[in-house]
Each structure stands twice: as C-alpha cells, then as structure tokens.
Amino acid sequence: MVNMVEAAPTRRGLLKTAGALAGAMVVPDAVSAAMRATDAKRVPLTSSSLAPVRPAPRVVPSSPRVVRPELMREALAAMERHGSRLALRDRMVIADFSAPSNQARFHFIDLVSGKSVSKLVAHGSGSDPGHTGFLQRFSNKNGSNASCEGAFLASDYYVGKHGKSQRLIGLDPTNDNALARAIVVHGAWYSNPDMIRTHGRLGRSQGCFAVGERELAEVFERLGQGRMIYAAKV
C-alpha cells in the first residue's frame, strides 16, 4: 500500500457545502479546483475503536456530473453525521446503485485535489435475483446475499477466501450488520470488464463490494483505512 499525505479540513467548509450542492453536479476532474489544506497524519485503526477527526473540506462542484447532486448531498450529510468515526475525511467513495452494473458506479471522490476516479463494482445476488444488472432492493439480514445501503467505515485488511480483502463497519441502522455478514471489499473475476463484453453486465456478489481483480490494488490505495464508503440508490 502507498501511504499518502492527508489533508485536515475545516468544519465551516462542510456546513457551507450542503447549500452549495443544491442543484449542482460533481465532475471527474473538478470536485474543487481551489482547495488548500494542512497535513494530517494517518490514524491506525481497529474494527472497534477509531479516532475522531475534524470535518471534511469545502467542495465546489461543477458540470458535467459524475455523481448526481442529490446523491452527493446524501454522502456529504453522512460524512458529517459520522464524522467522529472517520479517521480520514479527505476522500470518500460513493457507490451509486441507481446505475446498472455495466457502468462504472464506484466513485472515488478526492475532496482535496478535486479529482475523481470511477470503477466497476458488483452488487449482491439477493439484491438482483433475476440477474438483470440492476439492483432491485437492499437488505441488512444475514443470509440475504444482498447489498446493504448507508455509510461504511473502511477498516482493516485480511486474507480470506477471496484473497486480500478489506473489512467494512456499517455505521447506519440499514447496514450495521455488515461486519457480522462479512460485507467487505474484495476482487472477483465476475467484476472484470470482460464480463460486460461477453454478458453485458457484471456477475453478482453475496453482498460485498466486489471490484475487478486487476483493480483491487488501486481500490485499496485510493480507499485506504478510516475513510467512508456511502452506498445508496437515489
């Protein structure tokens, strides 16, 4: 993993952002073009205790969009709501489950540099029983094999049946069973781009955020530990 220099934002900026985002859109290379911040050290994590930090920086969105305004507003509100649980607030990931699985809908938003990168990500088979490529429903129940919605804290790494994976802690009532359900970030063959070329859509996970095998290292580097994933269908 590559250690990256983090930025310590101001609280006033985030509070101004909610109003600024109304009717606005976020772009792949311009979430904010005029952002300056001081350095913040990476905070070690465990799945049970996390150090509080200061709020995220102000975001100045513009057009054309990569994340729809209403979804961006929800994600920023979640970051504010769960700020004491997030060790790093310079970046976040938004999973837009309104989009089908053949679109890059896993958006890595850098709130400091203004850049964003979007990746393919699979949803759970229980969320799409007919394998249409569209998420139909969320579930937080054991055995549902469905994706769950809400804010997740990116926690520690481990090696399991899917190889190197990253545990997620659900921060909302809609996903607070994520750790017990082993809802994680991992790589999978059925999330590789060639699935779209041959089948028109990705395969399905058991509720995990499954990304392409060749994308996993970059996903881990961009997400890191202590940041937020926000998943929703808005």
Image (tube, grey):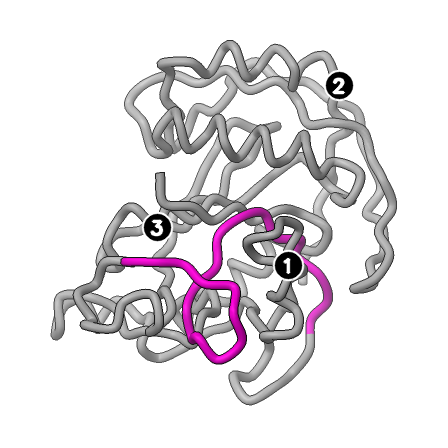
Cα separation, mark 1 vs mark 3, equals 19 Å
Q: Which residue is painted at 74% across and 27% down in the image? A: 55
**Dominant secondary structure (helix, strand or loop) of the stretch shown in magenta:** loop
Q: Is 12 colored magenta in this rendering? A: no
Secondary structure of residue under mark 3: loop
Give the residue furthest to the bottom: 161
Mark 2: give few (<14), some (14-19) or many (20+) Cα within 10 Å. some
Q: Which residue is painted at 53% across and 76% down in the image? A: 142
Choose top left, top right, bottom left or bottom right for residue 147: bottom left
Amino acid type for the residue under numbered disc 1: Asp
Residue 65 appears at what percent x and percent y? 31, 27
N-terminal-most mark, 1 or 2: 2
Q: What quarter of the picture does the N terminus occupy?
A: bottom right
Dot 3 corresponds to which residue? 97
Cα separation, mark 2 vs mark 3, equals 30 Å
Residue 219 vs residue 90: left or right?
left
Residue 172 vs residue 73: left or right?
right
**Up-down relation of residue 78 to residue 198 (above or below):** above
Residue 191 image label? none
Q: Mark 1 and 3 residues: CB-CB less than 8 Å, in contact? A: no
Mark 1: give few (<14), some (14-19) or many (20+) Cα within 10 Å. many
Choose top left, top right, bottom left or bottom right for residue 44: bottom right
Amino acid type for the residue under numbered disc 3: Phe
Closest to the observer: 135 or 106?
Answer: 135
Closest to the observer: 81 or 167?
Answer: 81
N-terminal-most mark, 2 or 3: 2
Dot 2 corresponds to which residue? 10
The magenta segment is: 136-157
Q: Which residue is painted at 66% across and 22% down in the image? A: 57
Q: Mark 2 and 3 residues: CB-CB less than 8 Å, in contact? A: no
